[in-house]
Amino acid sequence: MTTIAKRFLRWSALAALLAWPIPASAKITQIIVDRTTTVTATGQTIPYEALVGRAFGELDPADPHNTIITDINFGTDSDGKVRYVTSFQLVKPKDMSQASGFMWHDVPNRTSATWA
């Protein structure tokens, strides 16, 4: 993976965390790209690739921002932190000099609510 792609991935992860609506405090400790594939679509003018991977992080239950998380104290490791893993898929131009600077962040709906 190129330096530009790594930088883009780090900034994308940071932007996703900053866009999070709940006032919790989290820290990404590691990002692993598990798979890189070429993306092709009709009408596509520049080559794109998809990076699929996992982001590992930790929460501090003692941080007042994290008190909103139910039962957070029951998930601590020996150092008092709570570890988590989240998956991601990032689609970007293969040549980052062709990137527009626009980022679309989509959060899946995890509820079973029906909206009228």
Image: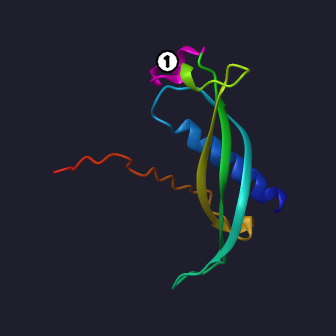
For the point 72% across and 58% down, the residue is 33
Classify mark 1: residues with Cα within 10 Å, few (<14), some (14-19) or many (20+).
some
In this view, which residue lies farthest toward the left?
116
Hey, which quadrant is residue 77 in on the image? top right
Residue 18: where, in percent of width, then height? 56, 36
Residue 64: where, in percent of width, then height? 54, 14
Q: Is residue 55 magenta?
A: no
Q: Is residue 64 magenta?
A: yes
For the point 74% across and 53% down, the residue is 32
User: In the rendered view, would you say 71 is above or below 5?
Assistant: above
Q: Nearer the viewer, residue 22 or 93?
A: 22
Q: Nearer the viewer, residue 25 or 32?
A: 32
Residue 115: where, in percent of width, then height? 21, 49
Q: Nearer the viewer, residue 39 or 46?
A: 39
Residue 111: where, in percent of width, then height? 33, 45
**Of the residues shown, which amino acid type is indicated by label 1?**
Thr
User: In the rendered view, would you say 36 is above or below 28?
Assistant: below
Hey, which quadrant is residue 5 in on the image? bottom right
User: In the rendered view, would you say 90 is above or below 84?
Assistant: below
For the point 48% across and 22% down, the residue is 71
In terms of secondary structure, where does tag 1 sit?
helix
For the point 59% across and 59% down, the residue is 89
- What span is colored magenta in the figure? 62-72
Left or right, 69 with reference to 17: left
Q: Which residue is mark 1?
A: 67
Left or right, 54 with reference to 24: right
Q: Quick one: quadrant of the N terminus? A: bottom right
User: In the rendered view, would you say 56 is above or below 46?
Assistant: above
Left or right, 112 with reference to 76: left
